[in-house]
Amino acid sequence: MSILLGAIADDFTGATDLANNLVKQGMRTIQLIGVPDAGLPVPDADAVIIALKSRTIPAAEAVAESLAALEWLQSHGTQQFYFKYCSTFDSTDAGNIGPVADALLDALDSNFTIACPAFPTNARTVFKGHLFVGDILLNQSGMQNHPLTPMTDANLVNVLACQTPFKVGLVPEETVVKGAAAIRRAFDDLVESGYRHAIVDAINDDDLMQIGKALANVKLITGGSGIAIGLPENFRKQGALKEGIAPTWPEVGGGAAILAGSCSIRTREQVAAWKKNRPALEVDPYAISKGEDVVALALAWAADKISGGPVLIYSSADPADVSRVQDELGREEAGSMVEDTLGRIAKGLVEAGVRKMVVAGGETSGAVVNALDVKALAIGPEIDPGVPWTSANTVTTAGPTEIALALKSGNFGDIDFFQRALDLLPGSSNT
């Protein structure tokens, strides 16, 4: 059995975001965590997403991991490939979007790809090559204060051009609205003029569907999860896509918890909403740096509360506080220290009986999934655009255990996302 669409995602929440869109469009989708072992059987799925934690690691490491994932996908006869990154194009001048895209193109012996992070359903649009969050340019949306990948330029042609030695062009909205044939001609013209990358405008789902049609014969696609909605129809027209099976809600008992590490504006709003009438504990990075057993303290705090309802443990802070911590402890050191702590707290919570967990932030989700040694996620129904419930298996001291995970990108979800996500689960008593 060959894989129709094989994706490499640079973080875990982005992978579930992509899986969610593919499932909604009728593709049976499996998400694998990390580069699979060579002997792993081909999953019975139309699409396989390999979730890496490569967004903010050194570019050379991101390239190596992505190429290893590509090799596995190629070995299983994958027809089309997809490099998935955030809808806010999270990256720096050093990468990792450009270096990874170039390496994948080289490995596939291909000379052209697109970059389209647009996801209009979540208010991410690209117009004249500029990325908007709602009506606000990316560099004015709060992303300019991101602790790891501050986005200070909304012009994606400029941003990507800093990450690749190859020419970066643009397929503008006035071309996109003319439909798939016009988009394909624009691709051909760019290739003929020596361009290897093209930012593609998209301001609504109709644009994404037309772009998807135009991508039918493009070997490698790069973008956010939005561009995926137009791809399944290409396989359906080939007669290669079977009838999809509707996703089901995870059904697990046990307690519930939320872990929030994202410092995005939306996650901080969600944390603030929760704290108004729900138990919440803030993780102090200074206490971690001083050697205090923050994990044990957090688990002790949660122990007598979980039986009464869900708890929130968070490290989300405003930009000024984050900058101060980074200045004193070091940018990478502070981030990895907190993420490691949240991962160990997650493991302790599961040992204590938590079976339903909402995780906010891509880096935090990666830390949690790694700490729980999760190897694959089954994609369930959507909570909010871009965020499904998933089910996974982990191992506790009591043996193999099924858990429900909602891995949320920092900027996604309504203000009441935490409570509503838990309330959606069957038999929920998260009141």
Image (cartoon, rainbow, N blue to C red):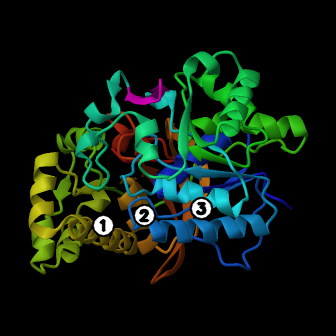
Q: Residue at x 16, y 47 (%)?
A: 319
Report which quarter residue 209 is drawn in: top right
Could you tell me how far apart the alpha carbons at marks 1 and 2 are, in whole angstroms? 9 Å
Segment tinted magenta in the rendering: 125-133
Q: Position of residue 196 (x, y in %)?
A: 61, 45
Task: Please tell me how crowded label 2 is: few (under 14), some (14-19), or many (20+) other residues with Cα within 10 Å.
Answer: many
Q: State left or right for residue 192 relative to residue 327.
A: right
Mark 2, residue position: 366
Pair 3/1: label in front: 3
* Quadrant where the C terminus is found in the figure: top left
Could you tell me how far apart the alpha carbons at marks 2 and 3 are, in whole angstroms? 23 Å
Toward the viewer: 323 or 259?
323
Could you tell me how far apart the alpha carbons at marks 3 and 1 are, in whole angstroms? 28 Å
Mark 1, residue position: 339
Tag 1 and tag 2, C-beta contact below 8 Å: yes
Task: Please tell me how crowded label 1 is: few (under 14), some (14-19), or many (20+) other residues with Cα within 10 Å.
Answer: many
Q: State left or right for residue 137 relative to residue 110.
A: left
Q: Is residue 171 above or below residue 97?
A: above
Q: Earlier in the sequence, mark 2 or mark 3?
A: 3
At label 1, which amino acid type do we have?
Glu
Reply yes or no: does residue 228 show up in magenta.
no
Q: State left or right for residue 423 relative to residue 282.
A: right
Q: Earlier in the sequence, mark 1 or mark 2?
A: 1
Toward the viewer: 361 or 73?
73
Q: Residue at x 79, y 53 (%)?
A: 79
Instruction: State whether residue 113 appears in this view.
Output: yes
Q: Secondary structure at mark 3?
A: helix
Report which quarter residue 322 is drawn in: bottom left
Q: Position of residue 20 (x, y in %)?
A: 59, 44
Mark 3, residue position: 103
